[in-house]
Image (spheres, rainbow, N blue to C red):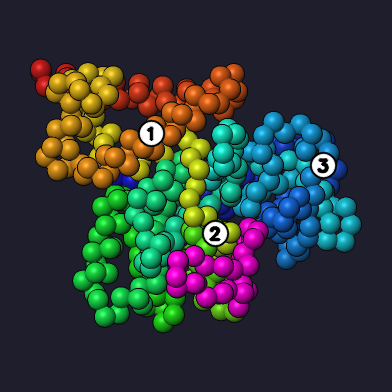
């Protein structure tokens, strides 16, 4: 069973204080300031200065921009950064504090480059509409990246009010999502009358940081308006013909809600391109990895080998055909991405090493099971 790993990945604590002191000494910078990135707009960043109510605009130093080997080294919303003051509400960003969580996707196309979305999130709320855009299989793809990030995923199904006269169909759709997302909390809300919103109150704790992600028009900005208590986003009505919304969220911004927690609003993301070392796949499809322990052969492909634990689980109904097909599709995509990456790139080496670690753990569990079987 997946567990909540998120309390707290975002906050400033004793460990961060030690990192701050160490990096400050190593940098040799006079009057260093620690700040949180609470917004991104092009090459500029909105900073909240630690220990004060001050906010300002941050820009990257030339050395940080020049020496970065990939976009992963640049600040993103949620990052803690080392900065110095340039002038009134202007700051220079020198470095990024080590992250405790990082949500990344791959740039579209064949280019094997990472596109970081946000860092140091405790939870990532995946909003998915119960309208014509309802596709549970798409949730699995996004969950691979969320589990990979180290944050805890929470699924929020929106537009519950569309089923005010069809409770049975509503419950069927909720059940489909639960089956596609084992180990993940699933909630259902109506943005219009707040029904179901109270069930999420426990997640908006003081000092925690969460992100909202999902397709355009799913209700991210509308929900954020309700939590803040005022209109901070101009939201347009969703076109009934194709359920694709249009709104003005084009950058990533963090907002402080009434409980004191931070929430990041993001532009609409209909589908995330995978950027994973495989660990997110394991947590998204735990039943498949658990069944593979029962395979006779450690390198079982789960296709033609005898005594295959996965095939037996599929035959018995413990693993659904839909889940198996989705797993294979995502696994092939990850393998294709790894093959397209430059063999000597850091990303490629890290991905290869982590897959090797996963297979090693599977082998250890297989050996342990064999010892217990023949004891």
Q: Distance from label 3 to label 2 (Cα)?
A: 30 Å
* Image position of 361 with respect to 327: above or below: above
The residue at which mark 3 appears reads as 61
Q: Main secondary structure of the magenta part?
A: loop
- Could you say which disc has been placed on residue 331 in the image? 1
* SS class, disc 3: loop
Q: Residues within 10 Å of mark 2 (few under 14, many from 20)?
A: many
Give the Cα separation between the discs numbered 3 and 1.
39 Å
Seen at 45% across and 67% down, the residue is 243
Q: Quadrant of residue 296?
A: top left
- Discs 1, 2 touching: Cβ within 8 Å: no
Q: Nearer the viewer, mark 3 or mark 2?
A: 2
Q: Residue at x 28, y 63 (%)?
A: 173
User: Quick check: 157 above or below 163?
Assistant: above
The mark that comes first in sequence, 3 or 1, is 3
Task: Say what secondary structure mark 1 lies in.
Answer: helix
The numbered dot on residue 341 is none
Chain part drawn in magenta: 231-256
Q: Position of residue 230 (x, y in %)?
A: 59, 79
* Residue designated by label 2: 268
Query: Is 315 colored magenta in this rendering?
Result: no
What residue is rendered at 40% in x and 57% in y? 154
Front residue of 283/206: it is: 283
The quarter of the picture where residue 157 lies is: bottom left
Question: Farthest residue in the right direction?
Answer: 87
Q: In what quadrant of the picture does the C terminus appear? A: top left
**Direction from residue 266 to residue 165 in the image, left or right:** left
């Amino acid at each position: 069973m997946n567990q909540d790993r998120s309390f707290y990945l975002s906050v400033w604590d004793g460990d961060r204080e030690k990192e701050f002191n160490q990096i400050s000494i190593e940098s040799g910078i006079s009057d260093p300031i620690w700040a949180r990135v609470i917004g991104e707009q092009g090459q500029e960043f909105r900073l909240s200065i630690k220990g004060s109510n001050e906010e300002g605009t941050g820009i990257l130093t030339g050395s940080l921009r020049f020496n970065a080997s990939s976009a992963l080294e640049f600040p993103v919303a949620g990052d803690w950064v080392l900065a110095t003051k340039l002038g009134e509400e202007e700051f220079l960003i020198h470095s990024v504090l080590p992250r405790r969580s990082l949500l990344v996707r791959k740039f579209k196309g064949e280019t094997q480059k990472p596109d970081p979305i946000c860092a140091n999130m405790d939870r990532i709320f995946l909003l998915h509409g119960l309208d014509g855009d309802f596709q549970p299989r798409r949730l699995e793809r996004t969950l691979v990246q969320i589990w990979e990030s180290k944050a805890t995923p929470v699924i929020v199904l929106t537009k519950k009010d569309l089923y005010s006269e069809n409770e049975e169909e509503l419950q069927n759709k909720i059940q489909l999502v639960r089956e596609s997302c084992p180990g993940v909390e699933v909630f259902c809300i109506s943005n219009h009358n707040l029904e179901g919103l109270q069930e999420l109150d426990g997640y908006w704790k003081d000092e925690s940081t969460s992100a909202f992600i999902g397709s355009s028009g799913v209700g991210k900005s509308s929900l954020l308006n309700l939590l803040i208590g005022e209109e901070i986003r101009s939201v347009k009505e969703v076109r009934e013909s194709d359920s694709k919304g249009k709104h003005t969220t084009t950058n990533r911004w963090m907002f402080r809600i009434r409980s004191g927690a931070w929430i990041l609003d993001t532009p609409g993301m209909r589908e995330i391109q995978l950027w994973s070392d495989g660990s997110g796949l394991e947590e998204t499809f735990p039943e498949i990895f658990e069944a593979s322990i029962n395979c006779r052969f450690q390198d079982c492909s789960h296709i033609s080998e005898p005594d295959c634990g996965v095939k037996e689980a599929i035959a018995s109904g413990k693993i659904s055909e839909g889940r198996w097909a989705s797993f294979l599709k995502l696994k092939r995509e990850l393998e294709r991405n790894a093959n397209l990456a430059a063999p000597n790139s850091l990303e490629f080496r890290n991905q290869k090493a982590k897959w090797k670690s996963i297979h090693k753990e599977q082998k250890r569990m297989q050996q342990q099971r064999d010892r217990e079987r023949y004891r």
